[in-house]
Image (spheres, rainbow, N blue to C red):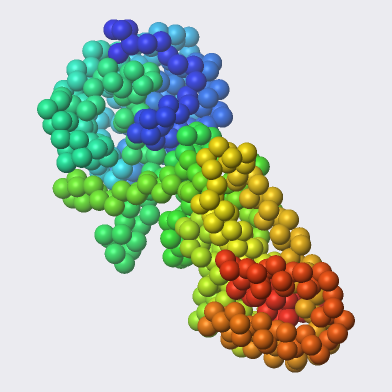
Amino acid sequence: MNSIGQPQINQQIDFTGNWFIDIGMLGFINLMEEVYGWNLDVLREEIESEPEKVYYGYFPLAYIRYNLMKQREKKLNKTNNNELPFFKGSVDKKQIFEESWKFIEDNYLDDDGRIPLSSSNEFYYFHNFLFFQPKWKKEKQKSAFEEILGLKNLEDDVLVHIDKTVCKFLPSKEEFPNISYTGSLITNDTLQNIVPHSTIFVLTFPLGFISFINEKDEKENRRTMFYSSDMKFSYKINKKIKQMVERSTEKKESIFTVTWEAIIDTLIELKSQWALENMYLVSYNLTDNQNLINVEYIGIPKLQAAIIMDDTIRENLNKYIRYSKEIKWKWLIQEFIKGNLLYPTIMNHLNLVLNKDLELSYSSSLYSLLVESKILEFKKKNEKSQIFSPDYFDNYKSLIKNIKDEISFTSFASGLINQISESAETKNRIARELFETLKSNNKNMFLNILLKNLNGNKELSSNRNFYNWILKKIIANNTSFEMYGLILVMNLLRRKKNE
């Protein structure tokens, strides 16, 4: 409600913490950018300077124009701001709306005396709602818009039609059986207590999603959006996802992969220190009877989020690596985020290097193995740590430091294995023998082969740095010896052209 008890216009548009309203805000931003070309920064400037014109003039015009454009039934020319009303001298919100509505009637009224809005595509939520009703003429449509904008009293029962669809995103009656004894979950008072103009954001909620179309299987068609509690970050990510989807129609990348490509690009662009664990990927499919299926909330574990925030680690994991004869590739950072072990992928990669003379991805493999190794050590240590130990609340920072220190130390110490022979053929033989023992996870056999070959090189076998590294990382290591063993194999296979 506006003149009838609605709070004053909020001069800023920003997330509220209510994910439903926040997605509606993203939809509002997408709408205004699609019709007027205003990105988030420009829209915020417009709201800051003339909020009444944005909400009561430009919004209803944009909403109707976009709906008609999506139908492709009307041949609408490319929007030109010079053709649109600028509400010159208008300061009263009712006057602004009247001017906007006059432009709508003059340009979009059909022969039946109504604005031909359709509840298809993104607007399927509103199949039975207000101005989408096929029998409603322009007068009732106008009155409905005035209710939504707070220019007239908005009765709660008006929102029930939205509630029937939207409640599928909310807790089920099986989980919260008392809900069925209450009124509508969505009321005007509830919405306005979250943020002014919440009813607008309810209308633009579906526009916050991006369409993923699967031409081979319509059941896989879905709408997806990235959500975090930071509006600018979420806006940029979703914009990049949309651009990637539009650019790569032939690529069959998963939604998850496309999203993370956008996230990584944005992290690099913004040099953001955003806490990555507070992120979600929300997807839904709507069947013909408005049943909601496959809603997914994908949170990023705090451990992976903390590690990825380091620029150097992220850069080395942000690589594709070949792992099978069929020229299949895995994106290491995606596997890491999903919590999948990286060791098997690096094993398969090295197997190809041994058998197919494939170029070794040394740096990415090294980081993958040592990140995984230090995480295993970290988790084992944490099982024994006390809640109020000195490093308990700062342990992720110490983990990242340990990873980087380990990479520096191990890349030097393990590299000494190259001194075992000047013959590439000999190094390949030793690498293959060691690799076979790692496949069977036979630590004793690994050490026997290693020591047998070291005995032939007195200088290397007496090298204190190398000896201490072998003792600590392989002989005395019962947590992750195979990862360090694989690093030795990598160094035996490493050639100058790969360095």
Q: Is residue 183 left or right of residue 273?
A: left
Count the marks: 0
Please name the residue shown 86% across and 85% down the image: 458
From this viewpoint, is residue 140 visible?
A: no
Residue 354, by quadrant, is bottom right
Q: Is residue 153 above or below residue 390?
A: above
Residue 495, by quadrant, is bottom right
Q: Is residue 180 above or below residue 288?
A: above
Q: Quadrant of the N terminus?
A: top left
Q: Is residue 471 left or right of residue 62?
A: right
Point out the residue furthest to the right here: 459
Q: Quadrant of the C terminus?
A: bottom right
Q: Is residue 449 above or below residue 200?
A: below
Q: How far from the left and from the top, in percent, is residue 125?
A: 24, 39
Please name the residue shown 38% across and 20% down the image: 195
Please name the residue shown 68% across and 68% down the image: 473
Q: How far from the left and from the top, in percent, is residue 183?
A: 15, 24
Viewer-side residue, 495 vs 211: 495
Q: How far from the left and from the top, in percent, is residue 356?
A: 62, 87
Viewer-side residue, 170 vs 344: 344
Q: Is residue 297 above or below residue 336?
A: above
Viewer-side residue, 175 vs 463: 463
Q: Is residue 284 left or right of residue 140?
A: right
Residue 455, by quadrant, is bottom right
From this viewpoint, is residue 448 visible?
A: yes
Q: How far from the left and from the top, in percent, is residue 149?
A: 32, 19
Please name the residue shown 57% across and 53% down the image: 381
Q: Is residue 448 left or right of residue 103?
A: right
